[in-house]
């Protein structure tokens, strides 16, 4: 039997048309070259229409790629609207990749136009630009620009006048599976891999983030996406906010504790999201008296994701009167896949345990932990690789060489499962707990040691600010854990004793390295590949 409902394609046009119609008066505070400016969604959409008109004038056709090389600014948000809103595909280039990787992703995506933040011109202009790029448009303050970069004509964002703005409704895809954006994974091996989001997947994921039991983003919120707009669409917060009519505050480059506190206070931010280090630094700055806790008084919920949130960080945020929301994600899952909200009927202990887990699947997603090809029991103890499937999970990587990614997917039970490379347990209630990345587990004397668990315990020591545990080769045990820590007034023997009270003796690292800062990846996670290179 066929349903009688309208087969209206899902897409970003629904997000944009709704926001422009219903929320035109809503104020938004957008960072940029000239500092934060307060404007409205109405004004923002007018500017997006002007930019869309300019993109059309450049001769771009539906499906062509437009890239951005920018922090979280007003102009970046304009591209978020104008590009997919014109039927083009937005490639948000990771500004922290090496020049070679940037050139690779731009060529691989086939970008025709790139929008560049003037503050990043030194990094951008050093890239050997592939021939596909025809136009480089620069916004922000910069005294001099060359006429060309590679084959591309360089112009200023403010240059054209007389170009008619886009009119009428935003681009409505004939097929909801048309591409709306491209993000490259920040993988630690080989070239970055391309995840191409569809209008449908972005819409569904944004809608899901507005659910009361997920991020609960609503018209009552003021959302500050701290996570970079080049990292998995800033976890889809901009699109979810436009859909819900939540106000947005974009911090631009000001993601240090003082800058964020100012942003939060100025915009009355209620909701934000970032990797654990960002929030740990903010909590430390409050503790050190460098940030006034009153500046955070409007903040209700902070999402911690991208790496494991320690129990210490969760309780420190709660002590500031902020509800911490731990979430797990992957660029490949649009990106949020799991959310650690406690079950409705939970007693305090269960609620606390569920909040520090990686969480339960977002609506629409299915998961399993697989060990030796067999799903592990959901008993909270058996471990297996997390596999995930659903309408906003990748089915393939764009333009991957034949066979290069075959081992990333498994067909089973009529579903296509993404192999995440994360080793987890799943409990009776469906809460997932990450044991480790497959490649970060430490194998000592035939037994596995979770680097994440050791890091969590170390972070519970009041003198420890950052901790990363890696495996180093050992002639007797094959591998042993080594802890790299940022700490004050504590020595290795004290940390060893502290851990020995919490984990079996044989798991306690033999070596501790005290450093000023643990190196981070391009998206702010502990850079364990680099640490292994340095200490192995
Ligand atoms: P990316 O695609 O760069 O966002 O990286 C995805 C990976 O980040 C996942 O496969 C996990 O290993 C890790 N990750 C993301 N969120 C969490 C979390 N809440 N806890 C632990 N690891 C996480």
Image (spheres, rainbow, N blue to C red):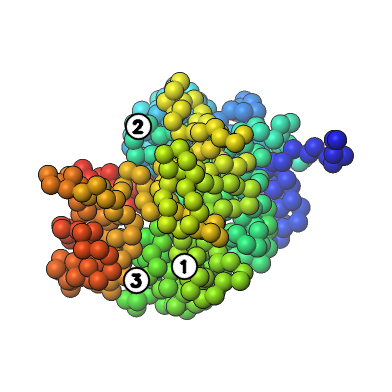
Secondary element under disc 2, as helix, strand or loop, is loop
Q: Name the spot of residue 149 as percent of width and height, x first.
A: 41, 29
Secondary element under disc 3, as helix, strand or loop, is helix
Residue at 36% x, 28% y: name it: 128
Residue at 54% x, 47% y: name it: 367
Q: Nearer the viewer, residue 70 or 377?
A: 377
Q: Is mark 1 within 8 Å of ligand 1?
A: no
User: Which disc, if any, is residue 469?
Assistant: none
Query: Alpha-carbon neighbours of circle 3 within 10 Å: few (<14), some, or many (≥20)?
Result: some
Per the image, the residue denoted by label 1 is 353
Does any portion of residue 77 appear in the rendered image?
Answer: no
Residue at 42% x, 57% y: name it: 381
Residue lying at the far left of the rendered structure = 475
Q: Is mark 3 within 8 Å of ligand 1?
A: no
Residue at 55% x, 67% y: name it: 342
Query: Alpha-carbon neighbours of circle 1 within 10 Å: few (<14), some, or many (≥20)?
Result: some
Q: Name the spot of residue 195 as percent of width and height, x first.
A: 51, 36
User: Which disc, if any, is residue 284?
Assistant: 3
Per the image, the residue denoted by label 2 is 190
Q: Which quadrant holds the C terminus?
A: top left
Q: Which quadrant holds the N terminus?
A: top right
């Amino acid at each position: 039997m066929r349903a009688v409902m309208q087969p209206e394609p899902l897409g970003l046009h629904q997000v944009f048309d709704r926001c422009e119609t219903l929320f035109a008066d809503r104020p938004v505070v957008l960072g940029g070259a000239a500092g934060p400016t307060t404007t409205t969604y109405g004004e923002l959409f007018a500017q997006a229409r002007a930019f869309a008109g300019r993109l059309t004038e450049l001769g771009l056709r539906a499906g062509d790629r437009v890239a951005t090389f920018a922090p979280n600014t007003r102009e970046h948000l304009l591209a978020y609207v104008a590009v997919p809103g014109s039927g083009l595909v937005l490639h948000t280039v990771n500004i922290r990749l090496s020049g070679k990787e940037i050139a690779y992703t731009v060529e691989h995506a086939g970008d025709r136009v790139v929008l560049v933040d003037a503050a990043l011109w030194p990094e951008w202009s050093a890239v050997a630009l592939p021939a596909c790029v025809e136009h480089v448009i620069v916004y922000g303050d910069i005294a001099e620009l060359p006429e060309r970069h590679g084959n591309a004509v360089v112009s200023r964002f403010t240059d054209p006048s007389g170009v008619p703005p886009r009119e009428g409704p935003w681009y409505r895809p004939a097929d909801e599976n048309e591409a709306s954006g491209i993000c490259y994974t920040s993988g630690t091996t080989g070239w970055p891999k391309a995840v191409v989001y569809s209008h449908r997947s972005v819409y569904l994921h944004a809608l899901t983030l507005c659910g009361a039991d997920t991020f609960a983003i609503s018209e009552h919120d003021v959302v500050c996406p701290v996570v970079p707009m080049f990292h998995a669409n800033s976890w889809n917060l901009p699109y979810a906010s436009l859909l819900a009519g939540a106000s947005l505050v974009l911090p631009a480059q000001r993601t240090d504790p003082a800058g964020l506190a100012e942003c939060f206070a100025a915009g009355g931010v209620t909701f934000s999201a970032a990797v654990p280090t960002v929030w740990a630094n903010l909590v430390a700055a409050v503790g050190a008296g460098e940030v006034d806790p009153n500046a955070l008084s409007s903040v209700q919920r902070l999402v911690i994701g991208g790496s494991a949130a320690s129990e210490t960080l969760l309780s420190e945020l709660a002590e500031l009167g902020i509800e911490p929301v731990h979430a797990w994600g992957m660029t490949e899952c649009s990106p949020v896949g799991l959310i650690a909200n406690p079950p409705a009927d939970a007693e305090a202990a269960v609620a606390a345990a569920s909040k520090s887990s990686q969480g339960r699947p977002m609506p629409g997603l299915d998961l399993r932990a697989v060990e030796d090809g067999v799903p592990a029991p959901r008993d909270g103890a058996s471990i297996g690789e997390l596999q995930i499937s659903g309408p906003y999970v990748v089915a393939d990587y764009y333009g991957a060489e034949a066979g290069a990614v075959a081992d990333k997917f498994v067909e089973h039970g009529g579903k296509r499962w993404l192999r995440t490379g994360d080793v987890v347990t799943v409990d009776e209630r469906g809460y997932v707990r990450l044991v480790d990345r497959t490649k970060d587990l430490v194998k000592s004397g035939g037994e596995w040691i979770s680097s994440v668990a050791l890091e969590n315990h170390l972070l519970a020591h009041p003198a420890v600010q950052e901790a990363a545990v890696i495996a180093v080769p050992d002639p007797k045990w094959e591998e042993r854990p080594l802890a790299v820590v940022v700490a004050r007034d504590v020595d290795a023997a004290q940390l060893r004793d502290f851990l020995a009270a919490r984990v079996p003796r044989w798991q306690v690292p033999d070596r501790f390295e005290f450093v000023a800062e643990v190196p981070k990846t391009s998206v702010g996670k502990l850079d364990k590949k680099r640490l292994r290179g340095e200490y192995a």
